Amino acid sequence: MTDPDQRKRLEELEGRIEKLKIKEQPKPHQEEHYSQAQQAWRMVIELVAGLMIGFGIGYGLDSLFGTIPIFLVLFTFLGLAAGVKTMMRSAAEMQRTNMAERAENDTAPDMGDDTTAPDTGDEERTKDGD
């Protein structure tokens, strides 16, 4: 073999190795698919964490000031509200992700003009004034 042939073969080999390395790299954390159970646990943990943080702050303030458990109740409700808000934000994020995935997957070829959507009866209701 001549020197240019070896160099060409070496470059081809390096190119194939790079392609295999790219293929075997782990996906970034954002591209992972989460099951519904994992998403549900995430939401539960966010709710409970908000409750516990609010409870802790309220208990700490009550013991610091020596008051009746007014801060405990107040901050527990605030923690609940914060947990619900965080949980709803996570649900909206998951919904956006699922809608984007569905939009990518709904690139099916056109079935032609003879296929129509099933009749839901909405047209009749609007005609009747319901």
Image (cartoon, rainbow, N blue to C red):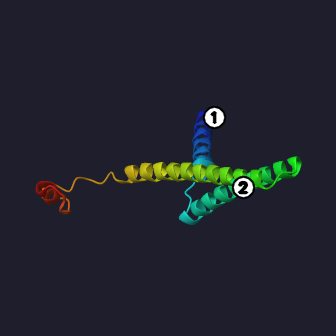
Q: Please provide percent x and percent y for residue 13.
A: 60, 44
Residue 104 vs residue 19, the one in the foreground: 104
Name the residue at 60% across, 46% down.
22
What is the three-letter code of the residue carrying label 2? Val
106 left or right, relative to 89 = left
Q: Which mark is residue 73?
A: 2
At 64% from the left and 49% from the top, the residue drawn is 82
Q: Residues within 10 Å of mark 1 (few under 14, many from 20)?
A: few
Q: Is residue 118 visible?
A: yes
Give the amino acid at mark 1: Asp
The spot of residue 20 in percent (x, y) is 59, 50
Q: Secondary structure at mark 2?
A: helix
At mark 1, the secondary structure is: helix
Q: Quadrant of the C terminus?
A: bottom left
Q: Which mark is residue 3?
A: 1
Q: Earlier in the sequence, mark 2 or mark 1?
A: 1
